[in-house]
Image (cartoon, grey):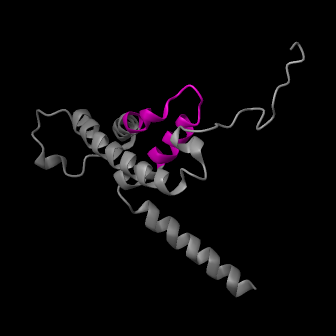
Amino acid sequence: MTNELSGWIGTVSDIVHQVQSQPMGVLLIPVIVILTCCIIAIPVVPGKMIAPLSILLGAGLNMAFGTVGAPGSIDPNTSLKFILFAHGLIIGAIAAAVHVLAAKVFGKKFPFLVGEGKRPTALGDTEIIDRKK
């Protein structure tokens, strides 16, 4: 039992180290997909906003947390924030594509994740009965 537990801990530790060694752009893609799913689950946000939300989230999050890979090769007069913004737009577009692919797989089982169908509410599936009728 102890050997099995230490094996699992070692595996989890290896996964964490691999994730931490990835560039920020790769790490932002699942974060953007998850945030987009959470935002789309809000009833007032239409499902057609998935791609624009992903792209804007990518730009914003990359500007906040990203780094420019090789700043020496960039013209010194260019704003690094603009470079981060442009890279973030590309990262967001990739996240939107991943979201669309995931929606094809999971959309039928969880339609609220793609902004369609019945969305979860605070009351769940409870019907409100109006006794005035």
The image quadrant where one finds the N terminus is bottom right
Q: Is residue 130 above or below residue 43?
A: above
Find residue 30 and report its horizontal and vertical position in percent. Answer: 46, 52
Image quadrant in which you'd find residue 13: bottom right
The secondary structure making up most of the magenta span is helix
Q: Residue at x 69, y 87 (%)?
A: 3
Q: Residue at x 19, y 32 (%)?
A: 79
- The number of numbered badges drawn on the structure is 0
Q: Is residue 130 left or right of residue 65?
A: right
Residue 58 counted in the magenta span? no
The image quadrant where one finds the C terminus is top right
Residue 46 counted in the magenta span? yes
Question: Which span of residues is magenta-colored?
Answer: 31-53
Frontmost residue, 101 versus 36 = 101
Q: Is residue 107 left or right of residue 84?
A: right
Q: Is residue 31 above or below residue 116?
A: below
Q: Is residue 107 left or right of residue 80?
A: right
Find residue 115 and report its horizontal and vertical position in percent. Answer: 53, 37
Frontmost residue, 127 versus 63 = 127
Image quadrant in which you'd find residue 43: top right
Image quadrant in which you'd find residue 87: top left
Farthest residue toward the top?
Answer: 132
Q: Residue at x 11, y 49 (%)?
A: 73
Frontmost residue, 131 versus 111 = 131
Farthest residue toward the front?
Answer: 133
